[in-house]
Amino acid sequence: MEKLILRKVEAGREEMILNFGPQHPSTHGVINLLVETDGEVLRRAIPDVGYLHRGLEKIGEQVGYPGYMPFTDRIDYVAAMFPNEGWASAVERLLGIEAPPRAQWLRAISCELCRIASHLVSVGTMAMDIGAFTPMLHGIREREKVNDLLEALCGARLTYNYHRIGGVAFDLPEGWRDECLRFLDHFDAFVSEFDRLISWNEVYVRRLAGVAVISREQAISFGLSGPNLRGSGVDFDLRRDLPYGPWALPDFRKAVSLEVPVGRGFVGQVGDCFDRYYVRCLEMRTSARVVRDALASIPEGEIAAKVPRKVKPEPGEVMSRIESARGEMAYYVVSDGTDKPYRVRVRTGSFTAMGIIEEVSRGLMLADLVALIASLDVVAPEIDR
Amino acid sequence: MTPQEIHARLRARFGEAVGPMAETRRDPFFTVGKGPLLEMANFLRDEPDLALDALEDLTALDWPQRGVIEVVLHLFSFRHRHGVTLKIEADRAAPSLPTLTGVWRAAEWFEREVLDLFGVSFEGHPDPRRILLPDDWEGHPLRKDYREAGGWHGISNERENPLVELRRLDQKRRQENLP
Amino acid sequence: MTGPRHERTPAKPANPRGVLLGTLAFGLGLPLVLFSAVLVLSPLSRPALAAALVRRVGQALGKDWDPSGWTATGQQLLYGVSIALLAFVLVNFGAVVSGMTVWWEMRVSSRMQSRVGYNRVGAAGFFQWVADAVKLLFKEDLVPADADHALFRAAPYFVLVGFALVFVALPFGESLVAADLDVGVFYVVSVTALVVVGILLAGWSSNSKWALFGGMRSAAQVISYEIPAGIAILVPVMLAGTLSLQGIIRAQGPWPWQWFALATPAGPLAFLVFFVAQLAEGNRTPFDLPEAESELVAGYLSEYSSFRFALYFLVEFGNLWVMAALAVALFLGGWQVPFAGPETFAAARGAGELPSAGWWGLQVLSMGVFAVKTLLVVNLIVWVRWTLPRIRVDQMMTLCWKYLVPFAFTALAVTMVWQILVARVPSVGVATGLVLASAALLVGAAFLRRTFRNVAAAHDRVDLTNW
């Protein structure tokens, strides 16, 4: 393996090639980085992925449309509602059906709660990688509360399998709305406390400000998306600019206010690690607002549309895009008229984020590399599928 | 601009190399020839009205009946908030296309994945290695005629039905516990 | 499925009262025994008092033992035995205190992190460190094949010796010090430098790239921070006029405005510089980059296992105590008991050969004051560790050379000028102390108010019963 990578490395230098991984004591997952360094400053960090490749795209060609839903949870198990929604909306577009309004509201509520949970892990593990252990555990404590809510909703805490083709699987249980509102009341105060604890801590700011700056042009060219892209100053959010699912319903847009935080060099330069980190902190707040607004305005009705027993869409292809916690998750599904897809392609935000690491890591220090990877919020299942 | 308008602009510039819009009731796409592909890519990115500066996705479709592997590009423009889907056909026997890494940097990793899983080689790619599978893997799994090799470096990937296997193990244990 | 069913450790012990009593007995008893041993043995290891003790014991037994009439060898032997006993007690003290510091740190950190924390072994998980130590002893002792065997094995002992030797000059109470060296401070600073040797040896002999990086980086850190620490130490030395630790403590007073940290305008600055430098020397967050190496490897420790690893950990946590004890001795008044000046101690001594019970009582009081102050500083160190992230290597070097060293020099210069001033106008000294002490009180009050406000803003309340 290393022989092939060594082709990229010039001979006769003082540097060593070290393996950074694939065992990380953090939730970034099994990712390996080959680091060319003289001990302090890196010449380059070459990512080496594929340790978690499970062939999910090939599996999609074999299990059929409804059967693929549990597999989508595993595409990004840290924020599993998003792949669920993406698959459901892709197949719905292939079939030409639409989920009823209440189902769309429930999709939005579950997805935004999931975004909160995912960002809690992301900012928490970032703090832990920088050396502050306490904020991570506070984040996990809050994530447990979100998981409790989602467990009451769909029975699972990690791989939810909640959305269905045509709608969602379960309706809100008795008392769930009050429980959720109670959590949201407490959550805003928690985010403020979290900010006071770590975000504006001088040591933390010094570690992240101005580190690994990704310019706007670089971000767009490398295909970054989501908080990574917004952290570099590009004001783009699929929910607002290319609306899908519930975000495309006019009633929903009227009832729910969405603010899109964009990086502007909060403490350093635009596009540095702190911007990407703080955009996620702000997104937690905006997601909480979305859930609150959605719960206040949720209509009554069915939670799933009528879907034929054998799902056999007509031949054609769709590209359904979702604003996932880690960026743009897009399902490119090609149907050939049978009950199994001809091709399932999942385009994830973490894959392109990994792609930029080699370029941005030149000249970084080792500790900054950790900050870079943490700020890009990559998870192995999304990269490898 | 709608995809149809973008298609018209491209056709106006490159003529016959740009195929017609596909007849479909789902998402629209069109096929282009691979000869002027690099020029087309640069045109799509640099032309101010189009400004398709983001490569959203680059993947492939394997059509063994037609004897081609189609490489699919999804392009997007942040300035104009429009996008388009193109396909380029490559001969299935020896699929090869020019690389688009010089146009969109995101293509580097997408093309590596297509090389890995479909076997399409991209001329001029700065780092043509497999990305997801081990470097010494044989075969391209997402092709329709891919057959598993039965194992890798002595680790078998063939196993019997778990229900059958567990029942056999239970019986073996019961026999061992008897005396 | 068939197979052995593993018994889970029950969440609540079978006999909660028993466990609690046992923990209290051991948890209070063991330190009490050790402290008492230190209390009794340290003054009694002086030749004069040891001789007096032997005479008294002889009288009680009806024998006539008079060490002053013994041969020189006999007296040396008596002295040697008493010193050996004291040394044994001190090393044990260091080890046990290090274990209990681990418990305290883990307990505090679990509460800070909203976790339950240790709760299985003993009440409040007090014996977890014992269990961990035993577990580490049972692990396989690996020496990497390519490592330098002799140095790999020897490195932990350098660190241990560097740690243990500090207890020689550390004053626990008014007369409770193993050896009141005239160059006490100088001795302590030089002996703690042995730790650097241990770290470098560990990193180099492991024959692993990561370990080498970590070792060199850690050694650079410790050596760099010796400079500001040393200069900051010169401030109390200058104020007291002596290098002896007991002398420095005696030059302070029991009240906060008489502590060196608050008695002079440069006192707080010197204390801050010293505290930060000691954190860096002990490889504590925010300065633990050499150890954490982004949590991928343990730096210079990565090849160590079992008992050798336990030694490093013992020294690291014991160093917390040592750091805190030094800070207390140099800047926070040491063992000085309020309302009990040197005359009280002399009066309580009595005229007999062996000191009277009142004197022993005063010693206990002074030891208690010292222990409480040290525990508070240990708590501060633990608190800082679990709050702050770690700083990067180049930022750490910048902090040391561009900030701490100039600040330390400033403190030194200001102290020199202030001393000249006080020699002319003595009231300035008292005034400075009172002003700074009240300023410290105000800062403390403001901090507490801010804390209560923050807790209320998080919709929480302060609950001191949540142990």
Image (cartoon, helix red, strand yellow):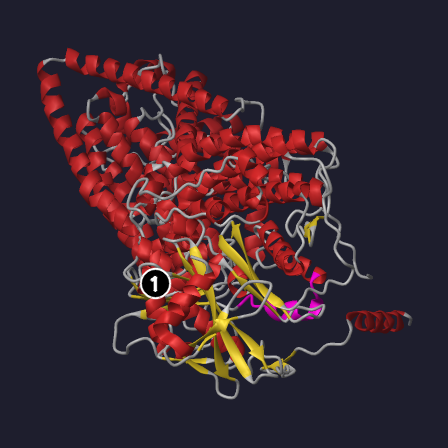
The answer to whether residue A54 is magenta is yes
Q: Which residue is more in the foreground, C413 or A52?
A: A52
- Specify whether residue B165 is painted magenta: no
Taking C165 as reference, is A382 above or below it?
A: below
Quick one: A152 or C265, which is closer to the camera? A152
Q: Nearer the viewer, residue C224 or B11?
A: B11
Q: Is residue A154 above or below residue B12?
A: above
How far across and down, in percent of the image, does residue C51 sit? 39, 32
- Up the image or down, A105 lies above or below A374; here it is above
Q: Quadrant of the C terminus of chain C?
A: top right
* Label 1 residue SS: helix
Give the left or right position of residue C146, taking residue C30 as reference.
Answer: left
User: Taking A107 as reference, is C246 left or right?
Assistant: left
- Decide if residue B44 is on the left or right side of residue C272: right
* Coordinates of residue C20 in the picture (x, y in percent): 66, 31
Residue B155 lies in quadrant = bottom right
Numbered disc total: 1
> The magenta stretch spans which residues?
A51-65
* Identity, as a three-letter code, of the amino acid under mark 1: Leu
Residue A214 in view in this figure = no
Residue at the (32%, 42%) spot, across then down: A264
Residue topped by disc 1 = C212
Chain ID for label 1? C
* Percent of width and height locating residue A75: 58, 59
Neighbours of disc 1 within 10 Å: few (<14), some (14-19), many (20+)? many
Q: Is residue B141 visible?
A: yes
Q: For this view, does A253 lie left or right of residue A279? A: right
